[in-house]
């Protein structure tokens, strides 16, 4: 009985510390951010660069709106354009410039590693992401990686050179835990899990991607 109580207590504590967040593609107003905060979402990751290599101005406005609404845990992510666009360094620098010019900021800048965005040549991909990482760090921001085991292994093979950065792991099993995680890329555990996507969320927000961190 005591053990059962203890387990229940631990589960309750864990539930209290489990933190929910979200990311979206569309514009979210400050009022809607406030509504989502009331519904239990406390961190936001806004898109800074879209796959064409262009700045996502709506995404940067979202970052600003999230902060105005009282979110303190606000990050950004970059979906890189790896062929025929500005250099990796310039893509990152343009995103950071645009964020600063908008009068706002992010904590970590997450780099999106999904197969369709990258080349088929591992060495090219390693050079590209290394340039992005260096530019992020030279600007004083933290780096993170958004990926799955499948995407990572196709794009970077056995390379473990990014494993010192936090992993935002994508796995749509709808579970707010890391139970289904198997190590890859040198990561023993994720930092954030995107556990479902394209959800009709609260506050009338469609296409909500749901994230969880312990
Ligand atoms: C970023 O801003 C700096 C300072 O204004 C400028 O020198 C640089 O060219 C900008 N870089 C990009 C890629 O927009
Ligand atoms: C995900 O979880 C939510 C909340 O428990 C539930 O309403 C929804 O049906 C689940 N979706 C899937 C795809 O499992």
Image (cartoon, rainbow, N blue to C red):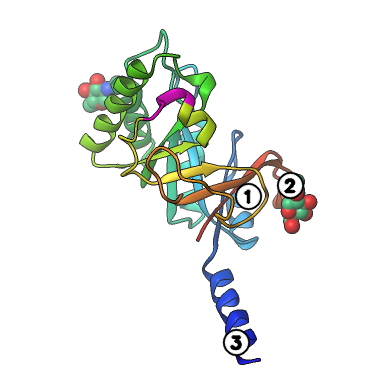
> In this rendering, would 105 be left or right of 201?
left
Q: Answer whether residue 17 is visible to the viewer in this image.
A: yes
| Residue labelled with disc 3 | 3
Placement of 139 over or under 119, stated as above or below: below
Placement of 152 over or under 12, stated as above or below: above
Mark 1: C-beta under 8 Å from nearest atom of ligand 2: no
Label located before the other in sequence (1 or 2): 1
Whether residue 44 appears in magenta in the rendering, the answer is no
Circle 1 SS class? helix
Q: Main secondary structure of the magenta part?
A: helix
At a point 29% along the width and 42% down the height, the residue shown is 141
- Mark 3 and mark 1: Cα distance apart in space: 42 Å
> In this rendering, would 118 be left or right of 10?
left
Q: Nearer the viewer, residue 201 or 71?
A: 201
> In this rendering, would 89 be left or right of 61?
left
User: Which image quadrant is residue 7 in?
Assistant: bottom right
Where residue 170 appears, as percent x and y from the top left, is 56, 41
Q: Nearer the viewer, mark 3 or mark 1?
A: 3
Circle 2 SS class? helix
- Mark 1 and mark 2: Cα distance apart in space: 9 Å
Where residue 39 appears, as percent x and y from the top left, is 65, 60
Label located before the other in sequence (2 or 3): 3
Residue 32: numbered disc: 1
Circle 3 SS class? helix
Where residue 136 appears, as percent x and y from the top left, is 28, 34
Placement of 191 over or under 94, stated as above or below: below
Q: Which residues are magenta?
A: 154-158
- In terms of image quarters, where does ligand 1 lie? top left
């Amino acid at each position: 009985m005591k053990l059962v109580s203890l387990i229940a207590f631990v589960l309750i504590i864990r539930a209290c510390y489990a933190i929910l967040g979200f990311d979206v593609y569309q514009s979210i107003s400050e009022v809607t951010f406030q509504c989502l905060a009331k519904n239990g979402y406390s961190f936001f990751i806004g898109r800074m660069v879209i796959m064409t290599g262009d700045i996502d101005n709506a995404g940067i406005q979202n970052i600003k709106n999230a902060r105005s609404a009282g979110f303190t845990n606000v990050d950004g992510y970059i979906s890189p354009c790896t062929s025929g666009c500005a250099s990796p360094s310039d893509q990152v620098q343009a995103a950071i410039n645009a964020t600063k010019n908008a009068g706002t900021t992010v904590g970590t800048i997450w780099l999106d590693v999904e197969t369709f965005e990258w080349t088929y040549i591992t060495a090219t991909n390693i050079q590209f992401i290394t340039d992005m990482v260096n530019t992020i760090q030279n600007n004083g921001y933290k780096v993170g990686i958004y990926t799955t085991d499948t995407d990572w292994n196709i794009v970077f093979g056995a390379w473990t050179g990014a494993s010192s950065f936090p992993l935002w792991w994508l796995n749509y099993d709808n579970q707010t835990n890391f139970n289904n995680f198997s190590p890859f890329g040198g990561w023993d555990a994720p930092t954030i899990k995107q556990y479902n996507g394209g959800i009709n969320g609260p506050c009338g927000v469609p296409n909500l991607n749901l994230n969880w961190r312990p």
